């Protein structure tokens, strides 16, 4: 590096930032927005700055995550907002719209533009757009060590002089440069640091159009104070901005803007060329480019992993290991939690003493049962997201998506949906949450709707019992048929939804393959923690509430399930079940299976007066035929997902019509396929 300051700066990591005891919502806080391309280290910097003093939600009306946190520095509170990773501030995606709208409308005190030093030209393009908003910017020049390994030399002091913007060299994964970054943010927010960005000049044609459009907009109360930025957005054909202006400006001026947009294809090129000219004028004076003879570790490994056969084999093995390890590690922890709640049930029963039976039942089986159900998900979800965080942080997640895209494309799905479908075999809840890796809203919603057709581990528990009782000699064949039917439904459903409620072409896979990196424990831990907490915040209350409702329905008015509302419902719909060979007890088991799929076994045990799985198996064999057992296996594999999954789907879809489809359509498909199997078997 040609920066004397950098060598001394990286010696001491930051220890006193992040996690300061600030109070979220402090009106005196200084707002700092973190902006940058995907995979530039934004999340790492955000986690270092905020520690546990952060919260994750959704942007208003959007399913994109909104991350905010607080830190203290020199006695002042800083609100840190992590904007979605994006390559530009155009309205080509939700992420781009959110980032642009926040910077322009919320006007943060400082915008930290995080830039990958090993990919300077592309990263600086976003910077040019941020500067056009009028924001006060600091450049956090990250990954300088990777730039050096790729043969790139950057004179940081010269680069700062040419841009006129404060530049802080950092290595986020090693916690280096964070103190200096905080110091620069503090100084810039108090006008104690020079900020005179080098001007970006467009051609005379573009500048004349900007002046004309700005002049027209200045006569209206437009919601943007920076009319130059709005004018440039119009020249770029930004539909989001134009749509906002439509109801504000006159018909004549709106027609003028539309006439300008008709030339947008040519104008966009001129605007982009001017920005790249600005970038090249700066980098040419401060950056020594790649040494072409350097072959990096990433290049060597990608030569193997992007190979169609070797790459696919490696990814399947890695994901198979994650699938196995997640359940191998979480199962004993879930059992421990289950035992702990059983002990609490006993303690609670003793504490309640001679309380009415209904109160004991409500508190122990209803309330505590609901809490136990929610808490039991913790190890599974947290461990899964630990592995997913490692995949993302190392760069393997991007490569698995790239490798699987060709296969998934044949099935009418997106490459990124492969990860979500695989996760669904463990649990549909994280499988549905995984849909957030999708860039396109249509692909994301499609992934949410098809995931519940993947049989989760709880459904496999129910299937395994019936297979062991009715098909012990053909267990493998039956299990393969179940998985095959469910996956065929996934493919057909995907194709069907694309042609109906989720119309549109599958979005092309545009993905950056980042450098391979050692995972950062802090980043991975915070990622897993935030995802897990997000699930409990969203789903916990619903699950507990519905568990209590189901308890009431299964105990009143008669005191037993067969004399309860649930039993009455089962007997009422029994005629519908007969066409599949189901009696009312099977139907009630399917209804209670809505709370959690494995609950079906407990329900059947009560209804058949069975004390264990062996006696339940004997009772089932005496009551139903192998054909009905197989039809039940298929039906419970495909019908309505469990309560936790439905709640998660509601939050992810944010669309009641699509949620209704996600509930009703699986019931229809399960009934149709089960009916065909049942009737076809009778014919032969």
Image (cartoon, helix red, strand yellow):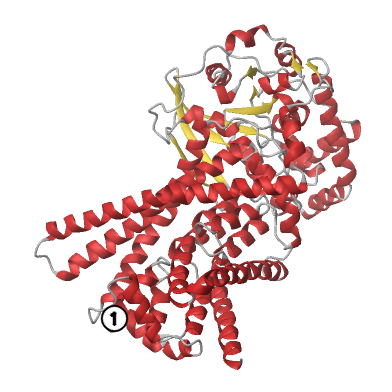
Q: Position of residue 648 (x, y in %)?
A: 49, 58
Q: Classify 681 as above or below 509.
A: below
Q: Classify residue 360 as left or right of residue 333.
A: left
Q: Position of residue 86 (x, y in %)?
A: 68, 39
Q: Name the residue under label 1.
A: 564
Q: Position of residue 676 (x, y in %)?
A: 60, 85
Query: What is the quadrant of the C terminus in the image?
Result: bottom right
Query: What is the quadrant of the N terminus in the image?
Result: top right
Quadrant location of residue 4?
Answer: top right
Q: Where is residue 287 in the image (x, y as percent from the top left)?
A: 79, 17
Say which residue appears at 58% left-offset and 37% top-offset. Answer: 106
Packing grade of label 1 (10 A; few <14, some 14-19, many >=20) is some
Q: Is residue 372 visible?
A: yes
Q: Classify 278 as above or below 37.
A: above
Q: Nearer the viewer, residue 365 or 585?
A: 585
**Residue at the front extreme?**
473
Quadrant location of residue 611?
Answer: bottom left
Q: Classify 121 as above or below 95.
A: above
Q: Classify residue 402 as left or right of residue 190.
A: right
């Amino acid at each position: 590096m040609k920066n004397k300051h950098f060598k001394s700066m990286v010696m001491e990591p930051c220890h006193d930032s992040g996690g300061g005891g600030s109070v979220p919502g402090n009106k005196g806080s200084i707002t700092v927005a973190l902006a940058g391309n995907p995979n530039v280290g934004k999340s790492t910097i955000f986690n270092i700055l905020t520690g546990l003093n952060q919260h994750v939600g959704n942007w208003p009306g959007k399913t994109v995550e909104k991350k905010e946190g607080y830190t203290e520095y020199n006695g002042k509170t800083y609100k840190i907002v992590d904007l979605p990773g994006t390559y530009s501030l155009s309205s080509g995606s939700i992420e781009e719209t959110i980032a642009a709208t926040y910077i322009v409308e919320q006007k943060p005190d400082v915008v930290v533009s995080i830039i990958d030093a090993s990919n300077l030209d592309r990263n600086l393009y976003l910077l040019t757009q941020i500067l056009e908003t009028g924001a006060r910017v600091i450049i956090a020049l990250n990954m300088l060590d990777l730039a050096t390994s790729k043969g790139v030399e950057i004179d940081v002091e010269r680069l700062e002089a040419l841009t006129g913007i404060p530049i802080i060299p950092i290595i986020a994964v090693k916690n280096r440069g964070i103190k200096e970054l905080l110091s620069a943010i503090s100084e810039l927010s108090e006008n104690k640091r020079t900020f005179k960005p080098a001007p970006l000049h467009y051609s005379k044609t573009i500048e004349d159009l900007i002046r004309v459009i700005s002049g027209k907009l200045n006569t209206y109360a437009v919601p943007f104070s920076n009319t130059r930025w709005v004018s440039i957005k119009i020249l770029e054909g930004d539909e989001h901005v134009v749509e906002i202006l439509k109801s504000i400006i006159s018909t004549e001026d709106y027609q003028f803007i539309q006439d300008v947009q008709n030339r947008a294809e040519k104008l966009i090129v001129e605007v982009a060329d001017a920005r790249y000219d600005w970038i090249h004028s700066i980098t040419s004076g401060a950056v020594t480019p790649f040494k072409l003879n350097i072959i990096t570790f990433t290049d060597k490994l990608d030569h193997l992993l992007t190979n169609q056969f070797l790459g696919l084999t490696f990814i399947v093995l890695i994901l198979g290991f994650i699938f196995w390890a997640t359940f191998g590690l979480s199962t004993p922890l879930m059992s421990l939690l289950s035992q702990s709640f059983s002990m609490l049930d006993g303690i609670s029963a003793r504490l309640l003493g001679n309380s009415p039976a209904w109160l004991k039942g409500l508190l122990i089986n209803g309330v505590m049962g609901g809490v136990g159900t929610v808490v039991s998900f913790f190890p599974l979800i947290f461990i899964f997201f630990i592995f997913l965080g490692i995949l993302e942080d190392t760069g393997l997640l991007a490569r698995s998506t790239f490798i699987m895209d060709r296969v998934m494309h044949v099935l009418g799905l997106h490459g990124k949906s492969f990860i979500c479908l695989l996760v669904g075999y463990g649990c549909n809840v994280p499988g549905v949450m995984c849909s957030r890796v999708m860039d396109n809203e249509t692909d994301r919603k499609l992934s949410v709707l098809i995931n519940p057709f993947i049989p989760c581990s709880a459904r496999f528990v129910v299937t395994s019992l019936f297979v062991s009782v009715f098909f012990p000699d053909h267990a493998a064949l039956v299990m393969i048929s179940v998985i095959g039917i469910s996956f065929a439904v996934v493919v057909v459903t995907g194709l069907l939804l694309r042609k109906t409620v989720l119309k549109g072409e599958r979005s092309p896979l545009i993905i950056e393959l980042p450098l391979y990196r050692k995972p950062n424990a802090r980043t991975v831990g915070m990622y897993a923690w935030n995802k897990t907490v997000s699930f409990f915040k969203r789903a916990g209350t619903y699950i507990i509430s519905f568990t209590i409702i189901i308890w009431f329905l299964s105990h009143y008015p008669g005191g037993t399930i067969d004399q309860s509302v649930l039993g009455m419902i089962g007997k009422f719909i029994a005629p519908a079940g007969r066409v599949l060979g189901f009696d009312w007890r099977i139907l009630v088991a399917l209804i209670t299976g809505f709370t959690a799929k494995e609950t079906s076994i407990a329900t059947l045990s009560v209804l058949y007066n069975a004390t264990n799985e062996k006696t339940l198996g004997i009772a089932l064999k005496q009551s139903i035929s192998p054909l009905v057992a197989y039809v039940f296996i298929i039906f419970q594999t495909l019908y309505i997902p469990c309560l936790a999954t439905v709640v998660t789907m509601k939050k992810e879809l944010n669309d009641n019509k699509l949620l209704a489809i996600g509930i009703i359509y699986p019931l229809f498909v399960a009934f149709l396929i089960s009916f065909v199997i049942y009737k076809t078997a009778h014919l032969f």
